[in-house]
Image (cartoon, rainbow, N blue to C red):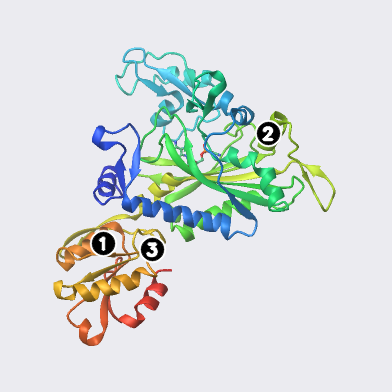
Amino acid sequence: MKVEIEKLISHLKTQGFVFQGSEIYGGLANSWDYGPLGAEVKNKLKKLWWDFFVRRNEYNVGLDSSIILNSKVWQASGHLGNFNDPLIDCKKCKSRFRADKLIEEKFTEMNVGGWTNQEIEEFIKEKSINCPKCDANDFTNIRQFTLMFKTNQGVVEDEASTVYLRPETAQGIFVQYKNSQRALRKKLPFGIGQIGKSFRNEITPGNFIFRTREFEQMELEFFFSPNDSNDWFEYWLEKVKFFLEKVVLIDQQNYSIREHDKEELAHYAKRTVDIEFDFPFGRGELWGIAHRSDFDLNQHQSHSGQDLTYLDPETNEKYLANVIEPSVGVERLLLAIFCQSYVEEQLENGERIVMKLPYKLAPYSVAIMPLQKQQKEKANELYKEILLDFDATFDETGNIGKRYRRQDAIGTPYCVTVDFDTENDNCVTVRNRDTMEQERIEIIKLKEYLLTKLI
Ligand code: GAP
């Protein structure tokens, strides 16, 4: 997979997938909007996740919780006290950096996740890491900076009205765990999945849609008995790998699995694995899978005073459930899929750019086109019929070669052309995006043909 990120960004913009946020006002740093085609792909991706992890999983149910929660939730979860980044300022040019990233960007094989601020400061001095902006070697000490976005609820702006935008969707699940379990009469093990926006005031956002301040997460919290002997971590790790390889067709060669060592593990986590993708700018976390023990339920139980234990109907024991959490960012997964799909191909008659998106994620499954003006009416009739069963588009401008290129560039798997012979033989020409091979198909068999090809 070789893709230059600048070329990809430019392609996604011109084709209507991703635009710079607030562009006509000069933009807003690090904000991106999803254009007509990007919104389609994003919605399809979320639906695939929801179907796989929620609707068609024997254990799980879904939830849609609020973005703004009672601030006590964030005290209990630890976010108000601990959700910080270590910041360091260059004394000469006054630029501000994440101290851990200063090291990791210079020594790309290193991961300083479990280090103390003192260890980071000492390493920066010892290795004489310079300011990436002005090259000076004169930094302040590290200060912690909260990632939580703060606002006020109601008309009075004071301490009591302070609320926060959620930095993860997970806590909304934990606080509705008991309600969901009771209402649905769920027995352990069971999971609750959720898709929604999260907000983090990231200090060093960047790399296009890889790290943004506003993003969407798809998270599953899977609750199980501490006495359960099944290895649910392995179970969910396998499910995530299956989803990546078989559902959204991520090539096994483009991702790797990194186990957190003891130093890097969060204090509550029993095990954490990061699935990392080889992005054009380097390897980066795509999907995290964590064993969160009973930490979150325990915290919410003690802060809320509510009983969050589960009464096991078989053993009559009461206990707090343990949790496995697979968590992925929608846009990060989308970026991985875009990077893998963007292909520049040399053909005999020039070059083409193809978005080899998985068929299920292509904005349109099929494009209907008249070869010439004379076939417009017939093609339009067919388009309206096809629209009843498929995500279709109608393309009539430019010569047929140009139209094929245009559909290749947005990833449409099949182009269907109504031509001079259609009137006589009731057949159309169907062209495949990847092989560019063309077949003559009877119109009455077109739906069946597309259904078998588009799975
Ligand atoms: N509830 C656990 C949790 O939020 P995380 O590792 O902080 O864990 C999970 O985030 C996933 O969310 C990451 O693997 C990544 O895919 C995505 N993510 C996190 N921060 C992000 C950001 N600033 N921009 C885009 N995606 C982000």
Left or right of 36: which side holds 101? right
> Disc 1 marks which residue?
407
Secondary structure, mark 2, is: helix
Residue kind at label 1, given as amino acid type = Gln
* Above or below 30: residue 356: below
Mark 2: give few (<14), some (14-19) or many (20+) Cα within 10 Å.
many
The numbered mark, 3 or 1, whose residue comes first in the sequence reads: 3
Q: Nearer the viewer, residue 212 or 179?
A: 179
Q: Position of residue 13 (x, y in %)?
A: 27, 46
* Residue occupying image coordinates x 51% and y 26%: 154
User: Assess mark 1: CB under 8 A from ligand 1?
Assistant: no
Secondary structure, mark 3, is: helix
Left or right of 25: which side holds 158? right
Instruction: Using the rendered view, name the quadrant where residue 345 is placed.
Output: bottom left
Q: Nearer the viewer, residue 164 or 357?
A: 164
Residue kind at label 2, given as amino acid type = His
* Residue occupying image coordinates x 38% and y 67%: 390
Mark 1: give few (<14), some (14-19) or many (20+) Cα within 10 Å.
many
Mark 3: give few (<14), some (14-19) or many (20+) Cα within 10 Å.
some
Q: Nearer the viewer, residue 3 or 377?
A: 377
* Above or below 2: residue 381: below
Q: Position of residue 292 (x, y in %)?
A: 64, 39
* Residue 300 numbered mark, or none: 2
In contact (CB < 8 Å): disc 3 and disc 2:
no
What separation in Å lies between label 3 and label 1 (alpha carbons)?
A: 13 Å
Residue kind at label 3, given as amino acid type = Tyr
What separation in Å lies between label 2 and label 1 (alpha carbons)?
A: 51 Å
The numbered mark, 3 or 2, whose residue comes first in the sequence reads: 2
Q: Position of residue 171 (x, y in %)?
A: 59, 37
